[in-house]
Amino acid sequence: MFRRVLIANRGEIAVRIIRTCKKLGLKTVAIYSEADRNALHVQMADEAYEIGPPKVQDSYLNVDKIIEVARQSQADAIHPGYGLLSENARFVRRCVSENIDFIGPSADVIELMGEKAKARLAMKHAGFPIIPGTNVATEDENELVKEAYEIGYPLMVKASAGGGELACKS
């Protein structure tokens, strides 16, 4: 079991993770950007470390700095929360290579689930029900219209490797 968990996130999700860790008797380590210095998750954690400027790319997505803080704070696990690094297979592999437990799915699962066509196929083979859809990769409008009629409406079109609502078109 873990003794000290670094929460690699901010805001509401970090607060929830900190509360849960405390209920489990675990020490918590928060990270924060300059802009989040006075945030609730920073105040609630047992320890907190500034990791960079307000820009997310320079702070909450700065893998080297987060690993450095995990080492400095002697965290034996990292919880990514959601968003940010939670779906980054390279980050998971880095944690593993640094002997820091990653609280979440393995890098292989993240990669598999990150590509919709492969994820659908894996779920189907595992016996899970999947919503109607297709893995047809074409730009032929007639083929796409044919597939749409077979699937039925309403219809959502997403990029195979896209994620979140930015990848959706109704």
Image (cartoon, grey):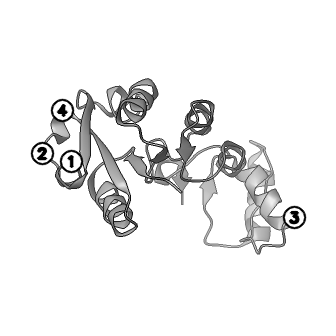
Task: Return the x and y of residue 44 as percentages of the image width and height.
Answer: 21, 55
Sequence order check, earlier mark of 1 and 4: 4
Which numbered disc, 2 or 3, marks the residue that appears first in the sequence? 2
Which residue position is annotated with label 2? 38
Report helix, strand or loop for mark 1.
helix
Q: CA distance from mark 3 to mark 4?
A: 46 Å
Locate residue 17, reporting x and y percent.
Answer: 37, 60
Q: Quadrant of the C terminus?
A: bottom right
Mark 3 vs mark 1, CA separation in Å = 43 Å
Residue neighbourhood size for the residue with mark 1, other residues' Cα within 10 Å, grouped as few (<14), some (14–19), many (≥20)? many
x, y percent for residue 123? 78, 64
Q: CA distance from mark 1 to mark 4?
A: 11 Å
Q: Quadrant of residue 145?
A: bottom right
Residue carrying label 1: 42
Q: How many residues crowd around disc 4 within 10 Å: few (fewer than 14), some, or many (20 or more)?
A: few
Q: Answer yes or no: do the residues labelled 1 and 2 have beta carbons within 8 Å?
A: yes
Total of numbered circles in the picture?
A: 4
Q: Are marks 3 and 1 in contact (CB under 8 Å)?
A: no
- The answer to whether residue 146 shows anywhere in this view is no
Mark closest to the chain's N terminus, 3 or 4: 4
Q: Amino acid at mark 4?
A: Glu
Select label 3 or label 4 by which is in front.
4
**Which quarter of the figure is the N terminus placed in?**
bottom right
Q: Residue under label 4, please give it.
A: 34
What amino acid is found at the position of numbered circle 3 in the picture? His
